[in-house]
């Protein structure tokens, strides 16, 4: 094997790993954006109902799950 083959193989593996992490990072950013939007909508009238609180809890739990998937825990 020559160094070019080894180098291309390493680059190929890194590209695959990066694309997986990139997809997880995009998902985490999307979840964060959705959670902030729903939080702003819920707090807009300065009243928080029990249902809104439960919905916000679910949204922020989704954020935590997506960040854990990205970090690997």
Image (tube, helix red, strand yellow):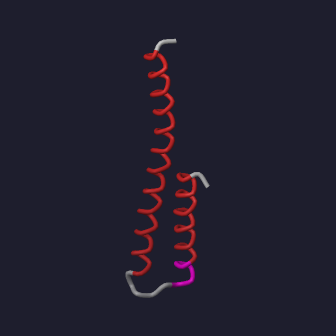
Quadrant in which residue 22 is drawn: top left
Residue 15: x percent and y percent? 46, 33
Residue 54: x percent and y percent? 58, 76
Quadrant in which residue 64 is drawn: bottom right
Could you say which is closer to the camera, residue 13 or residue 24? 13
Q: Residue at x 51, y 41 (%)?
A: 20
Q: Magenta residues, as a range? A: 49-53
Q: Main secondary structure of the magenta part?
A: helix
| 7 up-or-down from 49: above or below | above
Could you say which is closer to the camera, residue 55 or residue 17? 17
In the displayed image of the protein, which residue is found farthest to the bottom?
A: 47
| 9 up-or-down from 52: above or below | above
Q: Quadrant of the C terminus?
A: bottom right
| 1 up-or-down from 42: above or below | above
Quadrant in which residue 8 is drawn: top left
In the displayed image of the protein, which residue is found farthest to the right?
A: 73
Q: Residue at x 45, y 28 (%)?
A: 11
Residue 61 is left or right of residue 23, and the answer is right
In magenta segment, residue 37: no
């Amino acid at each position: 094997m020559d160094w070019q083959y080894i180098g291309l193989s390493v680059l190929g593996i890194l590209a695959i790993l990066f694309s997986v992490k990139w997809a997880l990072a995009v998902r985490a950013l999307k979840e964060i954006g959705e959670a902030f939007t729903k939080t702003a909508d819920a707090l807009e009238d300065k009243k928080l109902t029990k249902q809104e609180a439960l919905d916000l809890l679910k949204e922020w739990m989704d954020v935590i799950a997506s960040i854990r998937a990205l970090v690997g825990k």
